[in-house]
Amino acid sequence: MRPREFLPEEQHKRVTRAIEEAERLTSGEICVHIESDCPAGDPVERAIEHFNRHELWRTMQRNAVLIYIATNSRVLAIIGDTGINNRVPSGFWDDIRAELIARVAAGEQADGLCAAIHSIGQRLAAYFPPLANDINELSNEVIYED
């Protein structure tokens, strides 16, 4: 499946809106990256590559999260930047990741992503509440890579 086929246009818009809504709860930033194949085989390693390539670490509080999905490889990862990782417990993303895997396997890509994004926003709010002068530091658009 090509990455853009994973989320038809209306579902893409729903995911973008979910990111916007979740980011109102927190100063954290949430990004979604979808590609066809995970060449390294390890979705966490690949997510880190994309995190660095897209310079998601450039947030003021180092509090960006990346949801990475490789459609044909059928793998995904959720990773946070150092500002998050230094504050949250081990396994912080595990249940969100497990639910997202189940929802995608059931063909509920947009619903699964929206639920995961909402959960991430709620959890980040406890560690990174919204700031009075908060700005949107990263694009809310889903990144597709063929």
Image (cartoon, grey):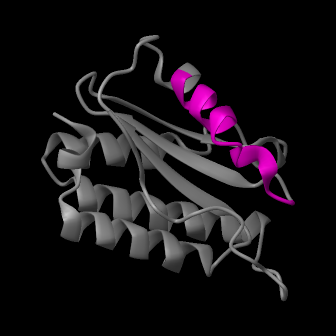
Q: Residue furthest front?
A: 146
- Quadrant placement of the C terminus: top left
Q: Is residue 5 magenta?
A: no
Which residue is found at the position 75% from the left and 79% from the top?
130
> Relative to the observer, which residue lies in front, 89 or 48?
48
Which residue is found at the position 36% from the left and 65% from the top?
114
| Magenta residues (range) | 46-60
Which residue is found at the position 65% from the left and 61% from the top?
138
Residue 7 pos. (x, y %):
23, 54
Residue 141 pos. (x, y %):
46, 62
> Relative to the observer, which residue lies in front, 110 or 93?
110
Judged left or right of residue 19, residue 112 is left
Tell me the chief SS of the magenta region. Answer: helix
Q: Residue furthest bottom?
A: 132
Judged left or right of residue 39, residue 48 is right
Q: Residue furthest top?
A: 40
Residue 27 pos. (x, y %):
74, 71
Residue 63 pos. (x, y %):
75, 55
Judged left or right of residue 45, residue 13 is left
Q: Is residue 83 above or below residue 28?
A: above
- Quadrant placement of the N terminus: top left
Judged left or right of residue 82, residue 32 is left
